[in-house]
Amino acid sequence: MDTEHHAPLRYTVAILSRGDAAARRDATPQNSRFVRVFEALAAIGIDARPAIYDESFADAVCDQLLAVDGVLVWVDPIHQGRTREALDPLLRDIAARGPWVSAHPDVILKIGVKDVLYRTRHLGWGADVHRYDSAAAFRAEFPSRLLADSPRVLKQNRGNGGQGVWKIEALSHAETMVRVLHAQRGSRPEDIPFDVLVARCEPYFGWGGCIIDQAFQPRLPDGMIRCYMSGSHVAGFGHQLIKALIPPPPEGPDSPAAQPGPRIMHGPDARQFQALRRLMENEWTPQMMATLGLDEPSLPVIWDADFLYGTRDAAGADTYVLCEINASSCFAIPDDAPAAIARTVKRRLLQIPAAG
């Protein structure tokens, strides 16, 4: 009889976020904004270490990531003018050499971009959505759509914090003049020539690749529901009254009335969101995976789907319209989410041999 006892596998992960050399030098789990995630991972026996990334010391970060079993990434698509153009190839290389990466850049390019609105427009969360792959196509096709159904919302493919998201309204001569409102805080409506709008949008066809055009949702003032997911399971909800794309009051964009309300967090069992939970877990997430060619293990350990309220159905019940999916840097998160993240990380790591 074999009486040899084997110690349980001990896995190590890195939590990757952006910062400078000082932040890298001083980073600890305790002083990280992800401290609750570090604690949840430690509670189930996973070593987690902070990893601070910047292009100027990318080689050192690469060496650090190659020494762990998994990498959890929290880096915005755009941050202070910097994109993930250098980071994404580094993460692809890391994943190809062994460590598991979540969210993998190729998964982000399927779900964490605005193009997901177009590719999944046939699902129950879909709306009137179009895609423009060039400035010439945008110039030729958008004016007639705007005249037929104004206002509309334009979204650059990759962005965050309202960057590159515009509400566009037709004026009396919509072919030449439009009213625009940027979603970034502090923006005010402007009446500009259509050619100026095209010039502002032209850079979006670079790194991002396309512009998504979505019908404006009139129930926007009712707020946005953020459905937090860990893998294919709901990890919580957040509800927030937002001001983006709603014109600021006369007293100015910095007045209290012009600021977004706090996001009220709820656990996955919150009664008012159970219909949305059932749709996400039983219908929309499986359908999205089938449409985009994804399997459950490739879904990020934390991502969220942002919904606006659609037109109520015949019975008076709410419907939901997807306005974006966040998969690059989903934070802040509900109180229940760190434990859900840790459970998902453990399931994924058990599928691979531990490093070292």
Image (cartoon, helix red, strand yellow):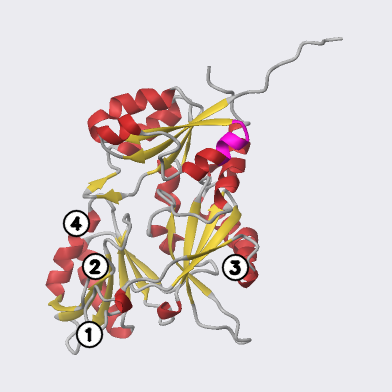
Front position among marks 4 and 3 = 3
The crowding category of the residue bearing disc 1, from other C-alpha atoms within 10 Å (few below 14, some 14 to 19, many at least 20), is few
Q: Which x, y percent locates residue 3?
A: 82, 11
Residue 179 shown left or right of residue 326 in the figure:
left
Magenta stretch in the rendered image: 40-45
Residue 10 falls in image quadrant: top right
SS under mark 4: helix
Residue of label 3: 276
Q: Earlier in the sequence, mark 3 or mark 1?
A: 1
Rendered view: 41 above or below 295? above
**What amino acid type should be assigned to the residue bearing mark 2?**
Phe
Q: Is residue 5 left or right of residue 206?
A: right
For label 2, the SS is helix
- Label 4, label 1: how far apart the Cα atoms are: 32 Å
Q: Amino acid at mark 4?
A: Pro
State how many labels appear.
4
Q: Is residue 348 magenta?
A: no
Between disc 1 and disc 2, whose residue precedes?
Answer: 2
Q: Is the Cβ of the residue at disc 4 closer than 8 Å to that at disc 3?
A: no
User: Would you name the residue on which mark 4 appears?
Assistant: 203
- Does the residue at mark 4 contact the one at mark 2 (Cβ under 8 Å)? no
Q: Tell me which secondary structure the magenta stretch mostly adopts.
A: helix
Under circle 1, the secondary element is loop
The residue furthest right is: 1
Q: Which mark is residue 250?
A: 1
Image coordinates of residue 255 in percent, x first then y, are 26, 76
Q: Does the segment drawn in magenta span residue 43?
A: yes
Q: Please name the residue shown 57% across and 34% down the image.
A: 42
